[in-house]
Image: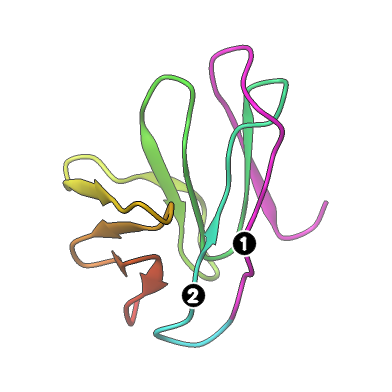
């Protein structure tokens, strides 16, 4: 599928779900969960946590990357804050 990065996570996991993906700085990101095969399929501006507990994000026009060594704060609504990248799931000018 064009525009998606697939990351191999540990086997198992839940059905994939995603929020809205948007364009432009300050746009809402798409939260993605691993699918039943343990894969994260991240669209541009997508983010999610693999089955090993590692957080990944995919900025616009870029490949997916882990957020290490940045701290991640997960909010009750499922959005995350990562300094320099996301605030409550909204992309900063990256």
For the residue pair 61 and 54, the one nearer the viewer reads as: 54
Q: Give the quarter of the image for residue 90.
A: bottom left
- The numbered dot on residue 82 is none
Residue drawn where x is 69% and y is 53% of the image: 4
Residue identified by numbered label 1: 19
Identify the secondary structure beneath mark 2: loop
For the residue pair 65 and 25, the one nearer the viewer reads as: 25
Judge from the rendering whether residue 30 lies leftward or rightward of residue 14; answer left or right. Answer: left
Q: CA distance from mark 1 to mark 2?
A: 9 Å
Q: Give the quarter of the image for residue 11.
A: top right
Residue 63, above or below 68: below
Residue drawn where x is 43% and y is 52% of the image: 78
Judge from the rendering whether residue 50 lies leftward or rightward of residue 18; answer left or right. Answer: left
Judge from the rendering whether residue 87 lies leftward or rightward of residue 90; answer left or right. Answer: left
Residue drawn where x is 48% and y is 22% of the image: 51
Q: Give yes or no for residue 61 being in the magenta stretch.
A: no
Identify the secondary structure beneath mark 1: loop
Residue 28, above or below 39: below
User: Which coloring applies here?
Assistant: rainbow
Q: Main secondary structure of the magenta part?
A: loop
Residue 69, above or below 82: above
Image spot of residue 44 (x, y percent): 58, 64
Image quadrant in which the C terminus is located: bottom left
Q: Give yes or no for residue 21 being in the magenta stretch.
A: yes
Image spot of residue 1 (x, y percent): 83, 51
Q: Which residues are magenta?
A: 1-22
- The numbered dot on residue 28 is 2
The mark nearer the N terminus, 1 or 2, is 1
Image spot of residue 21 (x, y percent): 62, 70
Q: Are marks 1 and 2 in contact (CB under 8 Å)?
A: yes
Q: For label 1, count other residues whose C-alpha is less than 10 Å away and answer few (under 14), some (14-19) or many (20+).
A: few
């Amino acid at each position: 599928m064009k525009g998606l990065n697939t990351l191999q996570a540990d086997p198992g996991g839940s059905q994939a779900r995603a929020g809205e993906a948007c364009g432009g700085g300050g746009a809402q990101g798409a939260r993605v969960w691993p699918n039943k095969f343990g894969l994260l399929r991240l669209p541009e501006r997508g983010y999610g946590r693999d089955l090993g507990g590692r957080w990944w994000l995919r900025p616009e026009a870029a490949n997916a990357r882990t957020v290490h060594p940045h701290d991640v704060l997960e909010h009750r609504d499922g959005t995350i804050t990562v300094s320099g990248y996301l605030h409550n799931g909204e992309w900063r000018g990256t």
